[in-house]
């Protein structure tokens, strides 16, 4: 009997999801210890997601902690209609959205008191170097919703139904928005490269 690698991976994913749901149910029943296992499972993926969405690893460090605390405090409200992963990413999305809005307001206020641009800190230089590739530059030019859509689909490999749930959108509308955003991203990356064709465009189109 031939066993396909894809089938094995799907079974492994289902087992992990089942284990997560069991851990969530135990936390909802009043146990604390299982949440440490949930944190261990999701800390890195949520940090990666926040890092891409915020464009800063240092901000993401604080954001992921806040998201996991919010999830714990509100876990009683979780219902397994959607996956726990989608529920957690939704919390992360709205938290990052609040941070981006707050950052925008702070920058507008600071401009009133800082006629000259502030000196870049060593930490900011590290972040800028990490996110200086053409893809990161193009992502930073997208609005928050467009950037979130691409990060969830391309980097986090979320399905369109999951993304629709996270963003509170219709799935078909999400698909159309994704295709338009992907073309917009490809054009910007091509411009950053001086008009040369973007080599990864075909690979990303497979996510459509």
Image: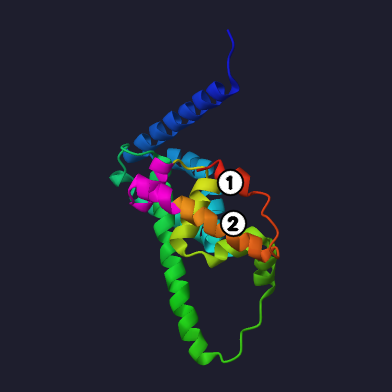
Q: Is residue 79 left or right of residue 68?
A: left
Q: Position of residue 133 (x, y in %)?
A: 68, 61
Q: Quadrant of residue 120?
A: bottom right
For residue 143, above or below residue 104:
above
User: Camera-side residue: 126 or 28?
Assistant: 126
Residue 168 within the segment the image draws in magenta: yes
Q: Where is residue 21 in the image (x, y as percent from the top left)?
A: 39, 34
Magenta-drawn segment: 160-177
Residue placed at 30% from the left, 40% from the top?
Answer: 79
Which residue lies under the disc numbered 1? 204
Residue placed at 40% from the left, 50% from the top?
Answer: 174
Residue placed at 48% from the left, 50% from the top?
Answer: 179
- The disc at residue 186 is 2
Residue 60 within the segment the image draws in magenta: no
Can the viewer see residue 96?
no
Mark 2 vs mark 1, CA separation in Å:
10 Å
């Amino acid at each position: 009997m031939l066993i396909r690698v894809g089938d094995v991976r799907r079974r492994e994913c289902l087992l992990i999801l089942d284990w997560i749901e069991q851990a969530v149910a135990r936390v909802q029943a009043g146990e604390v210890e299982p949440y440490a296992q949930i944190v261990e499972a999701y800390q890195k993926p949520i940090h990666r997601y926040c890092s891409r969405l915020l464009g800063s690893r240092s901000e993401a460090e604080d954001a992921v902690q806040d998201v996991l605390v919010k999830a714990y405090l509100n876990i009683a409200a979780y219902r397994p209609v959607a996956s726990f992963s989608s529920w957690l990413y939704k919390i992360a999305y709205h938290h990052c959205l609040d941070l981006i809005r707050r950052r925008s307001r702070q920058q507008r206020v600071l401009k009133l008191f800082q006629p000259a641009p502030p000196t870049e800190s060593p930490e900011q230089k590290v972040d800028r170097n990490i996110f200086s590739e053409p893809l990161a530059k193009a992502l930073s030019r997208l609005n928050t919703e467009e950037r979130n859509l691409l990060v969830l689909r391309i980097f986090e490999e979320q399905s369109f139904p999951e993304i629709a749930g996270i963003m509170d959108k219709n799935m078909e509308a999400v698909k159309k928005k994704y295709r338009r955003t992907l073309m917009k991203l490809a054009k910007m990356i091509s411009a950053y490269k001086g008009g040369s064709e973007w080599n990864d465009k075909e690979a990303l189109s497979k996510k459509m």
